[in-house]
Amino acid sequence: MGLPTYVFYSLSIILVYVSLATLLQMQFGQLGIVNFGIVGFWGLGLYGFGVLLLQYGVPYLPSLILATALATLAAFVLGWIILDLDSQSVLVATLAFATVVADLATTEKWLTEGIRGLGSIPYPLDLGGDSELGLFLIILVATCGVLFYAVRLRRAPYGRLLAGIRDNEVLARGIGKPTLRHKLIFFTVTSGAMGFFGALSASIQHFLVPTLVAPTVTFSVWIALIVGGRQSPLGGLIGVLATIAVFDFLIELFVPIPAGYAQYLPIVKLMLYGLTLMIVLLYRPLGILGARK
Amino acid sequence: MQEPKIQLSNVRKAYGGRTVVDVENLALGRHGIEGLIGPNGAGKSTLMSLITHKVNLDHGSIVFNAGTEGVVLSEWSLDEIARLGVVRTNQIIQDFESLSIVDSILLSLAPPRYEKLYSLFSDEQMQREMRPAVEEYLSYFQFSDPAGHALSAGEKKLLDIIRCLALKPKFLLMDEPTTGLHQDQTDRVLELIRRLTRDDGMSVLIIEHDLDVIWNACEHVHFMAEGQIMTQGSPAEIRGNSTVEIKYLGEPGA
């Protein structure tokens, strides 16, 4: 391939964000669960995978499956505790969960190597110069799967049920729907999927450091979804293209930035996300794809 | 007269020291359509909330299908009780605001086998099965925009009743069903309920302040005041009862 490897690196990261934002669209936009612990599930997948692969010598595919299972199990236990609480409590609890994951990544040096970092993680397929392309294609297929599910969900009886639970949970129970069970199953599976993308992300990053699992990931995904439109299954995709893709990919790669200013880039980026969010909320309160009010 | 479908024994509920419901013994569902009347604050709505376990009992037991092998309702959750066939229409307007009228009815009709994480392609088949029932409700009850959303308070109330009827309940609790409905809609609701009671063996308990509805529709009336069932009997007996007259009918404006 003629394209330089950093293009696939950036595109892979963008696709992971598209998946996370689409999973959040289903959790929040469709079902109404305020998950502020995205980076926790993603990070469990990321670090779980890295630790299994490098510290315990588990092969690639079993590591991927086990890391996903770990994130799924964490989601089930957390969901079991918090999902019958009100949305503010869910917000705080998921945020706290993500903080715990980030702290453990720093403190449990015997597992994660702490801030020294855990590396290096190989590509899933060793294709020589095309290994980045191989990883990108795997993530592309997985992302398309998530998008497809989100689009179909809207028109399925299950999607109607989730919307009903979001609109009025007590009323849904009154017509015989076991809402807590449905919330728990859906939250567990979609959060487990976030862990799966975390495990895949380990190969993008090569080297795992605790700053990767900072709350910035959660906030970026939320901003992307709100910008794109939380009601639409494609809101996450459009939102990521309008924020992360523009700032992390286009600006970072193609706008010449003087060497001395490169260190300010991450801060400026977050400010620009915030600015985009404010402008979109002013003119389209329900996001780019949201219905006009 | 049939066997009672719901039997309440020593049911008590208090909020902050104030006893709201204190029913020693009450058999419901021995007649097709029964009424529950009484002044505001008598505990009628709370009694219904206790039956569907929307609210926890303090004391006592509520048994469904008391004649055969009974189910103790207070051990089941609100949604399980609805699946058992004990369903309540809401006094205060409740709606799924993002769902259209059709989607709202389909949601109620949808059996669990279609509501699975992995059944992404079942809507067409479910629509084929359920659409005739939806159309029947829509042609029987007139909505101003049947393809859109329930617009007025009355339409939302009507939709709430339809959602409950779509569950084919064995015991239907109706908490002030006709408030906000036009007279012709009220008549249609009552006519349908009479038919379902007669043909499908459904039992109904209606709370209503519009006493014409009670006198016309009910075969049996329970009178409740201060948390207790004061008296019960046929509409004619209740109308002539002195306690009812003093505590309720005699009220100015009632």
Image: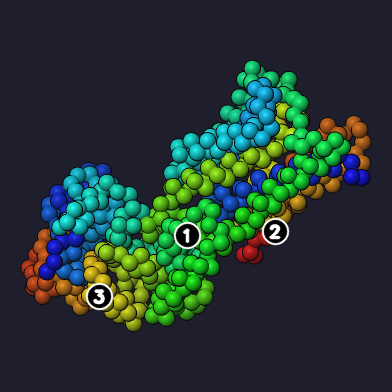
B246, above or below A125, in the image: below
Circle 2 residue: A288
Q: Are marks 2 and 3 in contact (CB under 8 Å)?
A: no
Q: Count the marks: how many?
A: 3
Query: Which residue is at a point 15% across and 58% down the rendered structure image?
Result: B67
- Please give the chain letter of the residue carrying mark 2: A
The quarter in which the N terminus of chain A is drawn is: top right
Query: Which residue is at a point 71% across and 49% down the rendered structure image?
Result: A141
Sequence-wise first label, 1 or 3? 1
Residue A23: x and y in percent read: 62, 48
Q: Are marks 1 and 3 in contact (CB under 8 Å)?
A: no
Alpha carbon distance from label 1 to label 2: 32 Å
Between A115 and B114, which is closer to the camera in this rendering? B114
Question: Which amino acid, by three-letter code, is at mark 3?
Answer: Asp
Secondary structure of the residue carrying tag 1 is helix
Residue B226: x and y in percent read: 17, 56
Eye-nearest disc, 1 or 2: 1
Residue A219: x and y in percent read: 66, 41
Question: Which amino acid, by three-letter code, is at mark 2?
Answer: Ile
Q: Is residue B51 left or right of residue B95?
A: left
The quarter in which the C terminus of chain A is drawn is: bottom right
Labels 2 and 3 in the same subunit? no
Number of residues whose C-alpha sits closer than 10 Å to that of mark 3, classed few (under 14), some (14–19) or many (20 or more):
few
B196, above or below A167, in the image: below
Residue A220, picture quadrant = top right
Number of residues whose C-alpha sits closer than 10 Å to that of mark 1, classed few (under 14), some (14–19) or many (20 or more):
some
Q: Is residue A224 visible?
A: no
Circle 3 residue: B199
Circle 1 residue: B114
Query: Which residue is at a point 69% across and 52% down the rendered structure image?
Result: A144
Eye-nearest disc, 2 or 3: 3
Secondary structure of the residue carrying tag 2 is loop
